[in-house]
Image: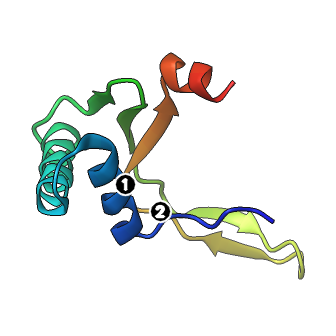
Amino acid sequence: MAASKLTKTQFISALSEGSGLDKKAVGALLDALTKLVKEQLGNGGPGELTIPNLIKLKTKDTPATQDREGIDPFTKQPRVLKGKAASKKVLARPVKALKDLLA
């Protein structure tokens, strides 16, 4: 049977036991990490952050697309396909140390 994923409380408890810090300190550390990610990936930041030995986070701006003419695949009638608004996506890639750890 597969192991179940950790809840937030279980995650904080596991980090607390592994590091020797109390749960409140681990929670504060995670809050600080969240703030750092927001600063680095948000507007005005470099758009890239590497968490050592774990993961590399990078943002990708996708431009808006215009409405365009197309053909409905079911009715074969022409119709207008709606465009999409511009958005910012976050890409997450494992670093080599994490790949080696899992191999």
Image quarter in which the C terminus is found = top right
- Horizontal side of residue 73 vs 95, given as left or right: right
Residues under labels 2 and 1: Cα distance?
A: 9 Å
Residue 87, numbered circle: 1
Q: Secondary structure at mark 1?
A: strand
Query: Which kind of residue does numbered mark 1 sit on?
Result: Ser
Query: Which kind of residue does numbered mark 2 sit on?
Result: Lys
Determine which quarter of the picture holds residue 56.
top left
In this view, the residue in front, 73 or 16, is 16
Residue 45 location in percent, x, y? 14, 35
- Could you tell me if the residues under marks 2 and 1 are in contact, i.e. CB atoms within 8 Å? yes
In this view, the residue in front, 20 or 53, is 20
Image quarter in which the N terminus is found = bottom right
Q: Identify the residue position indicated by label 2 in the image.
A: 84
Residue found at x 47% / y 54%: 65
Residue 82 location in percent, x, y? 55, 70
Local packing at callout 2 (Cα closer than 10 Å; few below 14, some 14-19, many 20+) is few
Q: In the figure, 44 relative to 21: above or below?
A: above
* Total marks in image: 2
Q: In the figure, 33 relative to 55: above or below?
A: below
Residue found at x 89% / y 82%: 75
Q: In the figure, 79 relative to 38: above or below?
A: below
